[in-house]
Image (cartoon, rainbow, N blue to C red):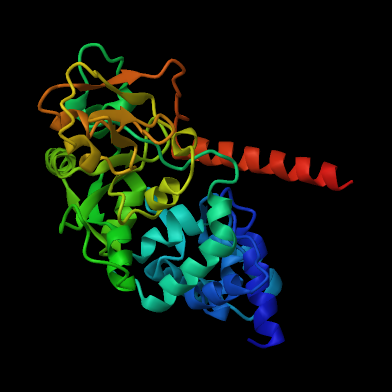
Amino acid sequence: MDADEITIYRNLQKHLDELPIGFPPTNSGVELKLLKYLFTLEEAEIATKLSFAYEPIETIFTRVKESNSALTELEALEILEECVRKGTIHYKMEGEQKLYANAMLVIGIFEYQVNKLTMEFMDLMKQYGQEVFDVELFRTRTSQTRIIPVEKSLNHENIVETYSNVREIIKNADEPIAVTNCVCRQKQDVRRERDPCKLTDRYETCLGFGHSAQMYIDQGWARRIKKEEALEILDKNEETGLILQPGNAIRPNFICSCCGCCCGLLRDLKKMNNPARLLKTNYIAEIDTELCTGCGVCVNRCQMDALSLIDDISTVNRKKCLGCGLCVVTCSEEAIKLRNKEKEFTPPGTIDDLNSLILTKKKELINKYEKLKD
């Protein structure tokens, strides 16, 4: 890249770094290569004029023309629409008006690459993650997703809030509802790092709701479904052994169904000593040692390697257990149950509330760091 290109992409990097999940710089400059892959120079300049809040083209163009008086509003709109097609920005409809906004790299741009992943993109993402972005994801210790238990793992003894009940989430979900392919499963196929997913050859496992789902449908990345089919898909996902991960809000805009071999988040968490502290869950598995026969089915079922056999008895690693309930439903001896944690977590109301919380915590960390420097 020449000096002018570097300046444009560096400006975009700094702009995106202001988002709740930022876009931090690296020593190697891989973040600029990643931005060049995602945005042309024209698109990068326009993207720096967007906000994380949704705005109409008229508002955005007032900022665009300050630095590019030769560009017309129609040309700016065409550039925004190309960014939408490429999955590098958000949009939503309010009535007849279309609103645009910056998207975070995760959850956002990466997920929007569904059905169009390339080896080049995955190599850049892998390097960027290893250098700084994986740390950025967990910087505030406020996860973008949470865990809800599979329905059949709960019993009358459990306290089940509506936000932990998958059927209630679907019942109250904003329309439309869409199902799309798992981008993580596709990522692993593109990288050819291993054999196909150990749990399933199904790709249509992820659900979206509301304006996020509408964007997927409009762009041909997903198909619209009814609530009844959404529940059927989740039933299949539970039977398969996939962990249910909605957005970390009472009213989430998606539910992912994840395996420990493909999901980038779960794979990273499995490497940590205490992933249960980072990924919010209100349940934990408990073993009745008198009933356990040491068959090992639960050990194989667990996607987090949280279960192991010690002296032929299943044992739970409390720091790794996410309370997903997958082990409960396959225990023929009914030796495992979920119990509510003593301290329960109530998620933010909406994804917007979640992002505000992450941004607030991020600013607090930055201020704390600046004070230490002084």
Q: Which of the two residues, 310 or 332, is positioned nearer the viewer here?
A: 310
Q: Which of the two residues, 117 or 130, is positioned nearer the viewer here?
A: 130
Residue 68 in view of the camera: no
Q: Name the spot of residue 176 as percent of width and height, x first.
A: 25, 45
- Residue 315 against residue 46 in the figure, above or below: above
Query: Quadrant of residue 140 in the image?
Result: top right
Q: Name the spot of residue 201 as percent of width and height, x first.
A: 15, 59
Left or right of residue 328, residue 95 in this image: right
User: Residue at the right extreme?
Assistant: 374
Q: Which of the two residues, 161 or 284, is positioned nearer the viewer here?
A: 284
- Residue 367 against residue 330 in the figure, above or below: below
User: Which residue: 37% across, 69% down?
Assistant: 85
- Residue 370 against residue 82 in the figure, above or below: above
Residue 234 in view of the camera: yes
Q: Quadrant of the N terminus?
A: bottom right
User: Which residue: 32% across, 59% down?
Assistant: 184
Left or right of residue 25, residue 297 in this image: left
User: Residue at the front extreme?
Assistant: 311
- Residue 28 against residue 256 in the figure, above or below: below
User: Which residue: 70% across, 77% down?
Assistant: 7
Q: Name the spot of residue 121 as percent of width and height, x first.
A: 43, 73
Q: Name the spot of residue 328 as percent of width and height, x first.
A: 20, 28
